[in-house]
Image (cartoon, rainbow, N blue to C red):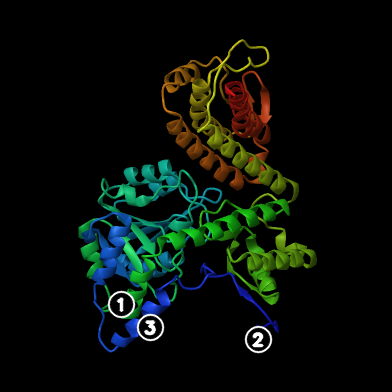
Amino acid sequence: MADHGTDTAVKMASNEVPFGPLPGVAEAVAAAMGESYRYADHMATAVAEAFARSVGVDRERVAVGPGSVGLLQQLTLAYAGPDDEVLYPWPSFVAYPQFSGIVVANQVTVALKRHSIDVDAVLAAITERTRLVFISNPNNPVSPALRSGDLLRLIEGAPSTCLIVIDEAYREFVTGADVPDALGLLADHANVVVLRTLSKAFGMAAMRVGFLIGDPVVVAAVNATLIPFAVNGPAQAAALAALEQRDEVARRCAMVIAERGRVAQVLRRSGLGLPASQANFWWLPSGNRSRDLALALERRGVVVRPFPTGIRVTVGLAEENELFLAALDEVRAGHPDFFGDWGLPTERLAGSTADFLDRLDVAIERLRAHAVAAHDGLTRPVPAETEQWEAAQIWAHIAEFGDYWLGQLDAVLDAASEQPVPFGRTRRDAHRIAAIEEGRLRPVDVHLDTIERAADRLGALVAELTADDWRRVGLHETLGEMDVARQLDEFHIGHYEQHADQLDELTQGSG
């Protein structure tokens, strides 16, 4: 404010939650100050036990440190040194190169694919010298997250000689149906480590309390590098109080998540594409003018975090987010050149992306409602066909087509040739018919879970499509050449809508 002569400013740079301490935390800290002349428990045993109970793991699998960032430093000290390799996608958390540099390890970076972690490239970069692989999930500062299949493929494809460190600092903000909780992978993979923190969703950024969850052998090695009494007494007291407030944490996170989605769509409809966030921040792919844009926002009282290729903006309260949007609009009006290197579609195409994402959300909500509704009778035949379906067949088909058509879309997007790429199948495809016949016997809730996971992956991909991606063309056997928008209408989002309409018809019949 002093630097720029402003009367007010909002800080949207450090991914803090905007709600203040959780109930009971400030009181716990004040009470703990009465013991501040004594050293606290070096291992923060009570905190470790409370956290272990809260996430359902054994105490011996938990280490406590000064924030997850402190535990990252401990991991690199314990497991890497000169001539070892530390591997991580990039852009990602800035502490990864900092700490691997401290131990003089060789830093191996892997470029993102669109705005997401490229698992194939990560696996290809691992060598016999790789000791640590850092995966920020969701990825800070870029905001998307790895989905279940990709994360499992990375873990199972990596050698057991390196640790896969899944940094889940923003786990509480995740809403993607197919974004995994990495704690579920620990039992079968001794070389997987998960990091969590109280700094973000729990509103304890200044108190510095984080957790490492992994094999007891890894926990012991990490504890051996812990600075004495690194987690102080007031911080331990605060942590114990905060861990009792998970319902309040969930309530606050829901407010952040609602604003995250609302503002993202406002930005897209204003003509600025951005990836789908699974954290409490947005990534603006503003390119080589990012520092200029960040400074212009700062002069208007909105403090954000610039990076070489983009800007990270923390989700704030609704009124803070409105100040950000107003400042951004003002900068766009006065400095349109700041936006010429935007890394995702702009103008009309960004708005089209928003439309597709809204349609997908509505279609899945309709299917959720149908999952608990009664359906009787058979559908009307589709034009020029005689086939009629009961509800069980509709659910089986919706569940089987999501992954299939995502694979076909990937084939079109990733093809080496710029010519129309053959893709797809017809209604008479034998695998399609067999999957529907087999799937009609499964419960609806099983199908709905599969549907939500596929839709989650689709929405994340749609948000990341570049202008070049939208121009890709596939060649279907009966429908001919189809650009990506037409594919989404025919086989993806429009497909969900079509079958939701059929279920509407059967619901009316049951009434």
Asked whether residue 493 appears in the rendered view, the answer is: yes
What residue does disc 2 label? Answer: 2
The residue lying toward the viewer, choosing from 377 and 166, is: 377
Q: Quadrant of residue 66?
A: bottom left
Q: Residues within 10 Å of mark 2 (few under 14, many from 20)?
A: few
Drawn side of residue 21 relative to residue 272, left or right: left
Badge number at residue 30: 3
Residue 87, how many percent across, how many down?
A: 39, 57
Q: Is residue 140 above or below residue 113?
A: below
Label 3 or label 1, whichever lies nearer to me, is: 3
Residue at 70% of width from left, 81% of height from top? 6
Q: Secondary structure at mark 3?
A: helix
Residue at 28% of width from left, 77% of height from top? 227
The residue lying toward the viewer, choosing from 402 and 448, is: 448
In the image as oriented, which residue stretches furthest toward the bottom? 37
Q: Secondary structure at mark 2?
A: loop
Residue at 25% of width from left, 86% of height from top? 38
What residue does disc 1 label? Answer: 230
